[in-house]
């Protein structure tokens, strides 16, 4: 192999926070073409491992994967990476979803309602952060 460090699909999936199945799907669709181990390391070309997917371990590659994952999530949920359903917002704020719901009833939390569900923007989460038990300015 050359100076570039390559990761197998399972290693890249862990490093970038997606599944190996998603990496394979993006490879098949041409969204994120993988290289093959045999092409990167000629000594492995004639072995069964020669066809394994590998990805260059660069920050650019990891960011590209995360961008693809965020785009997929936005298409699926209709929410951007700056919008959170109640349970995710509660996790970010380190409070229970029940507490967040109570804050909504009290008028402290002001989510945007979409399809009958509360959606918290990043701005609203920042506004609520001082109420969080682990808030440190």
Image: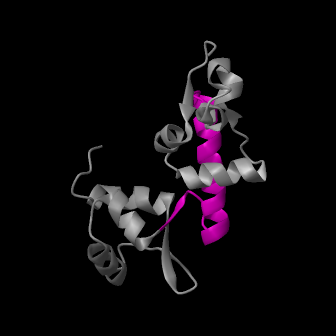
- Residue depicted at 44% across the width and 74% down the height: 110
Q: Residue furthest bottom?
A: 116
Can residue 78 be seen by looking at this rendering? no
* Viewer-closest of 64 and 137: 64
Task: Give the quadrant of the N terminus.
Answer: top right
Q: Is residue 83 magenta?
A: yes
Report the residue at 36% width, 58% height from top.
92
Residue 47 visible within the image: yes
Extreme residue in the right direction: 30
**Of 15 and 70, the residue lying toward us:** 15
Q: Report x, y in % for residue 137.
A: 30, 43
Residue 101, image x, y percentages:
33, 79
Instruction: Check the image and report above or below for 122 versus 2.
Output: below
Residue 81: where, in percent of width, then height?
56, 57
Q: Give percent across and percent down for residue 18.
A: 52, 50
What colour scheme was applied to this rendering of the protein? one colour
Query: In the image, which residues are magenta?
Result: 56-84
61 in magenta? yes
Q: In this view of the protein, which residue sits in the foreground, 63 or 99?
A: 63
Task: Please tell me which residue is depicted at 64% across the width and 50% down the height of the picture.
Answer: 24
- Would you say the magenta stretch is mainly helix, strand or loop? helix
The answer to which image quadrant residue 131 occupies is bottom left
């Amino acid at each position: 192999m050359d100076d570039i460090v390559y990761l197998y699909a399972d290693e890249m999936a862990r490093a970038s926070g997606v599944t190996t199945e998603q990496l394979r799907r993006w490879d098949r669709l041409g969204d994120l073409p993988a290289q093959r181990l045999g092409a990167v390391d000629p000594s492995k070309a004639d072995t069964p491992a020669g066809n394994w997917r590998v990805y260059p371990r660069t920050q650019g590659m990891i960011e590209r994967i995360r961008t693809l994952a965020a785009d997929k999530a936005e298409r699926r949920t209709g929410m951007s990476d700056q919008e959170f359903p109640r349970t995710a917002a509660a996790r970010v704020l380190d409070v229970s979803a029940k507490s967040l719901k109570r804050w909504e009833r009290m008028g402290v939390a002001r989510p945007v309602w979409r399809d009958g569900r509360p959606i918290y923007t990043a701005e609203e989460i920042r506004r609520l952060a001082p109420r969080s038990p682990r808030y440190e300015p």
